[in-house]
Amino acid sequence: MTGIAGRLSSARPMTLGALPFVALVVAWELLARAHVLNRVLVSSPSLIAAAFLKQLHNGTIQRDLTASAIEFVIGFGLSVVVGIVVGVAMGWYRPFSYALAPPLWLSYNAPFFALSPLLVVLLGLGTPTVVTIVFLITVVPIVANAAVGVRNVDRTLVRAARSFGATDLQIFRKVALPASIPYLMAGLRLGVGRALIGVIAGEFFGGKAGLGYSISYFAGTLQTDNMMVSVVITAVIGVILTQGANRLERWLDAWRGWS
C-alpha cells in the first residue's frame, strides 16, 4: 500500500500540470468545430493528429527528426566541450579571462540570426550552417557559467588541498569541479534551450531538412496542419530536454556528495 500511495503521490503533480493542456486542447477542438476559429489558419487538434499520422506513415517525421537531432547533438556537444574547457580556463587563470572576456561578451550580444545569410553564403545550405548557428548562440552562456563557478570556489579549500600536497589535477577534480557543478548546470540548462532555438531558427534560414525547415515550408504553403505537427514535436522535445537536464543535475548533485 505504501508503494502504491507513493506512486500516486508522485504522479499527482504531473496530472495537475497536464490538466490545463488537456482543457486547452478540448476548448481548441470545440471552437474549431463550431467555426469560431478559422481552421485554415489555426487548424484543430484532430486535424493535427491526422497530419501527424500521415507524416509518420510517409517518413517525413523520421527524416526531419533525424536531421534536427544530428544538428542539435553536434552543435550542442561542441558548445559544451568548448564552453567548459574555456570557462574553466577563464575561471582558473585570470590573464586568460582578461583576454577572452571582451570578445565573448561581444559575441553574446551579436545578432547571429541577422548574420544567417552571410553564414549561408560562406557555408552553404544544410548542416554546417545550422551547427554553426547552434554553437555560436549556445557556447557563451556555458563559458560564462563555468568561469563563474570555478572563480567562486572556496580558496580556503584550495589552499588546504595544496597544503596536503594535492596536484592541480586533484584539486580540480576533488574541489573545483564539484563546487562549480551548480553553475555548470545553470549554463547547460540555458544552453539546451538556446541550442534547440538555434536548430529551429537555423533551419528556417539555412536548412535543407529538419523540424525548422518543415515549419517554414508548411507555413509558406499554408499547410497549417502539417506545420503544427512540427511545432508540437518541437515543444515536446523542449520539455524532454529540460527534464533530462533536471535529472542530470540531480545525478551530479549525488556525485558531488560521493566525491
Image: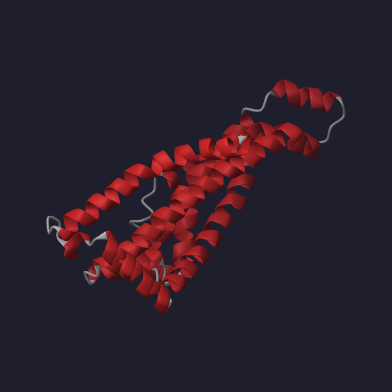
- Residue at 32% in and 69% down: 50
Name the outermost residue toward the bottom.
58
- Horizontal side of residue 202 vs 257, given as left or right: left
- Residue at 87% in and 26% down: 164
> In front: 25, or 141?
25
Please count the marks in the image: 0
In the rendered image, the quadrant that contains the N terminus is top right
- Residue at 67% in and 31% down: 179
Q: Where does the image place residue 99, in percent across and percent down from the top left? A: 57, 40
In the rendered image, the quadrant that contains the C terminus is top right
Which colouring convention does the figure follow? secondary structure
Residue 172 position (above or below residue 83): above
Answer yes or no: is residue 23 visible. yes
Answer yes or no: is residue 177 visible. no
Q: Where does the image place residue 230, in percent across and percent down from the top left? A: 36, 63
Q: Quadrant of residue 130?
A: bottom left
Q: Quadrant of residue 161?
A: top right
Residue 252 position (above or below residue 235): above
- Horizontal side of residue 4 vs 224, given as left or right: right
Q: Where does the image place residue 211, in percent across and percent down from the top left? A: 39, 65
